């Protein structure tokens, strides 16, 4: 009865959703696929026209295909239920199928591969031109165990041995940092300190890496642009960025937190609120604390004691003397004059013109440029200005309309990416998620947080396309106890298999972004070492005893040298004044 009610509710939601789309004349992405399939299924003339029009069909990145997409492709690649000879060509690596959250199903790849027939129709590209020999051997040994045989789990994929054909001096380095949690706690250190200090050492020691040139590859001193830090998720990002700054390491975060959660977006939002309503105390205090004014907390404390009901009145009542520091007093007097001028121009300039003038007059643009990720911050600022320009062109000119629209978007917190900037020829370390790194390669790759476990699934309602719908039920004798029926347990086990298999493939993708050197790290807590984590899989593959992790150079199978460490020299920099980021980067050019 409960499932029937849930299904009825789903049907009601779906019906209302369809009505809304029809009323607006819209289709979502799923509609485009479903209607395409419906068209091909129900109209033989269209199906035959398309089949005859295309002599060959090639599908790239086929490992990321789902069943619906394959149903569409197969309608024009088959005749009377059979694949036409030499018509369909698919390319993909099932070991890199990591888009389950987009409904990609690695089983589709496996099934289509089997339908192609014998080995004469399946070409394995077993040669790599990316990896140095030592790194290639490490990857083969690691993943023949981690991925291994696909038997017993339909979501697993077998590992295919790779041969390297890269011609370069082999300066491979593989390091596994299994950080001692007790030692980290005692020394008030973290995995981020390992990353920052290890990178700092590589740069200071000018460790050689292969760099491509017109005459082939040659060893040259490492630069920040040779390094990438690839993270599984963004939850670690703020702490990582802060620690890298502490160590003076130049970096650029690709994507980062959502665009509408960036501090510069909040700064502009508070500016607009103040210009629209001078009595908005919260927005004005935020603006005073931002780089638009740069007032210290102590300065704000003294400003609060000035005469006036609102902070705008207090600012107007300010005298050129008092308990303020000279810097705060000068900035407050300067900002007061600027704010008055901005308010006067508010109705005479377009919104985008007003913003550009304010950014320049307040030196806000210059203050962002001085940050480590200044280019990204400036690109975000330009994106805000472009949004204002687009808003004007759509017929809206009121400042209040724009900031209210911006407020609604901020409240919704959409995961819009930051403004795009070029990746090439950037002499800064790149920080990005593993998914963002797909298809890229770097001389040196850091793979941190390998001890992260899979996120627990606490949903009480589960669905599998080939098993159906299941829900946990309340135990009649236990008010707060939920019982999982057999079908729920079956679906739960299936989904855990799927997630675990994809996490193994995610581990493969992150390690194989490296060309020369790879640094793996995780905290060696019991769960990370023995559980279903990438760190645990690496420890198991290398035959290490979780209770007695060796330190120093470890010969894997008596041949391959892996550097294993549990502690590191933090080499925390001494407190200093502000560092010129341009000079810091130029030092590695």
Image (tube, rainbow, N blue to C red):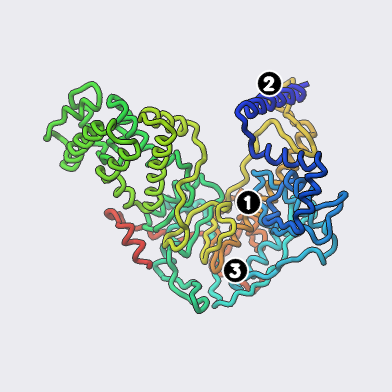
**Quadrant of the rendering where the C terminus is positioned:** bottom left
- Marks 2 and 3, the one that precedes in the sequence: 3
Q: Specify few, some or many for label 1: CA neighbours under 10 Å numbering under 14, 14-19, or 20 or more.
A: many
Residue 68 in percent (x, y) is at: 74, 43
Q: Is residue 523 visible?
A: no
Above or below, comparing residue 418 to residue 298 in the picture: below
Judging by the rendered image, the residue that carries numbered circle 1 is 533
Which quadrant: the N terminus? top right
What is the spatial separation of the Cα atoms under label 1 and label 2, in whole angstroms?
A: 35 Å
Q: CA distance from mark 2 to mark 3?
A: 59 Å
CA gap, disc 1 to disc 3? 26 Å
Q: Quadrant of residue 141?
A: bottom right
Q: Which mark is residue 479?
A: 2
Residue that mark 3 sits on? 130
| Residue positioned 45% across, 53% down in the render | 421
Choose between 255 and 305: the one closer to the eye: 255
Q: Is residue 334 toward the left or the right of residue 221 in the image? A: left
């Amino acid at each position: 009865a409960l499932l029937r009610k849930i299904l009825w509710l789903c049907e009601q939601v779906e019906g209302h959703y369809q009505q809304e789309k029809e009323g607006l004349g819209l289709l979502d992405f799923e509609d485009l696929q479903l209607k395409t399939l419906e068209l091909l299924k129900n109209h033989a003339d269209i199906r035959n026209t398309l089949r005859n029009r295309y002599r060959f069909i090639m599908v790239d990145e086929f490992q990321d295909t789902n069943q619906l997409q394959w149903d569409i492709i197969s309608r024009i690649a088959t005749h009377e239920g059979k694949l036409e000879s030499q018509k369909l060509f698919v390319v993909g690596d099932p070991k890199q199928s990591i888009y389950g959250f987009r409904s990609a199903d690695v089983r589709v790849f496996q099934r289509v591969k089997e339908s192609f027939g014998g080995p004469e129709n399946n070409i394995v590209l077993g040669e790599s031109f990316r990896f140095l020999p030592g790194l290639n051997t490490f990857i083969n040994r690691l993943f023949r165990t981690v991925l291994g045989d696909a038997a017993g789990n339909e979501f697993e994929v077998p590992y295919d041995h790779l041969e390297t054909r890269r011609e370069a001096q082999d300066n491979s380095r593989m390091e596994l940092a299994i950080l001692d949690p007790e030692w980290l706690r005692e020394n008030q250190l973290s995995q981020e300190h390992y990353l920052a200090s290890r990178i700092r050492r590589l740069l200071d020691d000018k460790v050689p890496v292969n760099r491509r040139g017109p005459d082939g590859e040659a060893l040259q001193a490492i630069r920040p642009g040779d390094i990438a830090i690839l993270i599984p998720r963004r939850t670690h990002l703020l702490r990582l960025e802060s620690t890298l700054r502490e160590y003076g390491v130049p970096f650029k975060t690709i994507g980062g937190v959502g665009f509408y959660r960036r501090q510069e977006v909040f700064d502009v939002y508070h500016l607009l609120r103040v210009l629209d309503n001078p009595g908005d105390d919260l927005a004005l205090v935020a603006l005073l604390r931002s780089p638009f004014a740069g007032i210290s907390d102590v300065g704000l404390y003294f400003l609060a004691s000035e005469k006036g009901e609102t902070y705008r009145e207090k600012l107007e009542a300010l005298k050129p003397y008092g308990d303020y520091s000279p810097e705060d007093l000068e900035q407050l007097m300067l900002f007061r004059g600027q704010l008055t001028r901005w308010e006067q121009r508010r109705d005479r300039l377009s919104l985008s013109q007003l913003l550009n003038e304010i950014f320049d007059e307040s030196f806000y643009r210059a203050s962002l440029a001085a940050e480590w990720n200044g280019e990204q911050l400036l690109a975000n600022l330009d994106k805000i200005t472009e949004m204002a320009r687009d808003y004007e062109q759509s017929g809206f000119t009121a400042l209040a309309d724009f900031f209210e629209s911006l407020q609604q978007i901020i409240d919704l917190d959409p995961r819009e990416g930051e403004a795009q900037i070029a990746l090439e020829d950037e002499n800064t370390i790149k920080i990005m998620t593993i998914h963002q790194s797909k298809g890229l390669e770097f001389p040196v790759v850091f793979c941190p947080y390998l001890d992260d476990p899979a996120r627990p699934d606490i949903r009480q309602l589960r669905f599998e396309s080939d098993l159906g719908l299941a829900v946990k039920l309340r135990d009649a004798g236990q008010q707060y106890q939920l019982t999982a029926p057999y079908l729920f347990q079956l679906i739960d086990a299936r989904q855990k298999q799927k997630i675990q298999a994809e996490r193994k493939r995610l581990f493969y993708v992150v390690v194989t972004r490296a060309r020369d050197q790879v640094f793996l790290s995780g905290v060696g807590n019991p769960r990370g070492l023995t559980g279903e984590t990438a760190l645990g899989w690496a420890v198991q593959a290398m035959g290490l005893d979780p209770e007695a992790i060796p330190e120093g150079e470890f010969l894997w199978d008596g041949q391959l040298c892996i550097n294993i460490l549990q502690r590191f020299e933090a080499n925390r920099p001494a407190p200093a004044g502000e560092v010129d980021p341009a000079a810091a980067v130029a030092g590695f050019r």
